[in-house]
Image: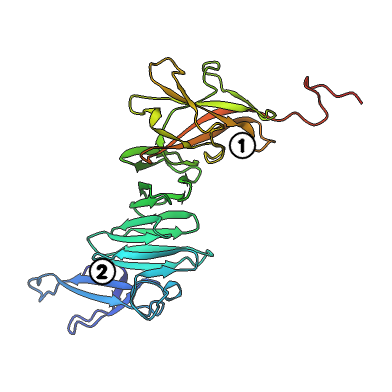
Amino acid sequence: MAPPANGGVVNWDSPTGDYTYFPATDYCGPDSFHFVANDSTVDSNLASHEFLVRCPTDRDFDGINNVIDPEPDLHSDDFSDGTTTGTILDRADQWIRVREVLEAESGVTVRAILGTNPATVSACNGSALLNLDAGEQVGITCGSVSIEVIDGPVDAVLVGSDGTEISVSLDASQSLTFYPETLVMTTPEGQADIIVTIDGQPVIIPGGNSSPVGIPIEVIIRPGADDGAVPVLNLSSNGVVPVAILGTEMLDVRQIDVTTVRFGGTGLEAAETHGRGHYEDTNDDGLVDLVLHFRIGALGIEPELSGTLTLYLTARLQSETPLAGLGEVDLRPPRPAGRNGRGKGANN
């Protein structure tokens, strides 16, 4: 006998065929086992026994626990714990199990069981579309969109508030947090890199990273400064810092919508000072670059910071395709109060 996938069989009585089945802890849904009979001479054909395990935590047997089921007495597809919401869009031939996360204030787990075709689940007001094959399980929390793969890999499409679609495949134990309004994605420190796809182009999200997601572009802060040196950014200055987006054979910077460009600590802060920028070939490669200027005080940098800091730039093409780039600066914090321009003590 091949034992059930989600439980066990005991007290098998060969003459009568009676047995006792017990489900795995907290398991609800379909299960089966396979067996053959033998008359001491030959085996019979393989036979199967299939059945459904009901749970008191799922009264309407739709796979959604009562406490997160808006209609616990009517078979339905929606779930909500007050913060994390979603809908089973297509069950296919899967049994879908949706449960609350008991050890957390919010969040649910979604698991697919036994089927051969992937089920589709929408979560967080359509900001995440999950495709689940049998045996795959994820934890989801809304607010921002947090996905943790318990059993994988799991394929997902993340949808920004502007309609941008980002495809990603996460292996077991991988997780990410996605902010639909800003297209920022974060991954835990120490986690392997994640590759997402935007408009058919792969984009690498390094482990421990928190940055906007977009087609990579090359950004030069203070173009024309010393080659190879990290440019200095004086936080005492009330001026502007020039930034160049380099044109390539694949990127015509004249197609960038300058009104969408943002630059700063997260790539969401400062807009171009003059609202237009200008075009020039900053690196003498024969390709046009876009030069922009940003107020230093609008970059969202804490004044007490010093040392090397990564700044992010985000933008969109006129076709709405998102772009993202980054560059490092060497911070010079504001001078302490009570000191003059040469850094010596002021006269009393």
Q: Which residue is drawn at 47% across and 65% down?
A: 101
Report the coloring of the rendering: rainbow
- The kind of residue tagged 1 is Ala
SS label for mark 1: helix
Task: List the residue tagged with mark 2.
Answer: 3
Asked whether, in this view, residue 26 is left or right of residue 348, the answer is left
- Displayed quadrant of residue 61: bottom left
* Residue 238: percent from left, percent from top: 67, 29
- How far apart marks 2 and 1 lie (CA) works out to 64 Å
- Between residues 134 and 178, which one lies in front from this camera angle? 178
Disc sitting over residue 107 in the figure? none
Task: List the residue tagged with mark 1.
Answer: 298
SS label for mark 2: loop
- Between residues 81 and 40, which one lies in front from this camera angle? 81
- Between residues 212 and 289, which one lies in front from this camera angle? 289
* Residue sitting farthest toward the bottom: 16
Q: Mark 2 or mark 1: which is in front?
A: 1
Q: Residue at x 38, y 16 (%)?
A: 286
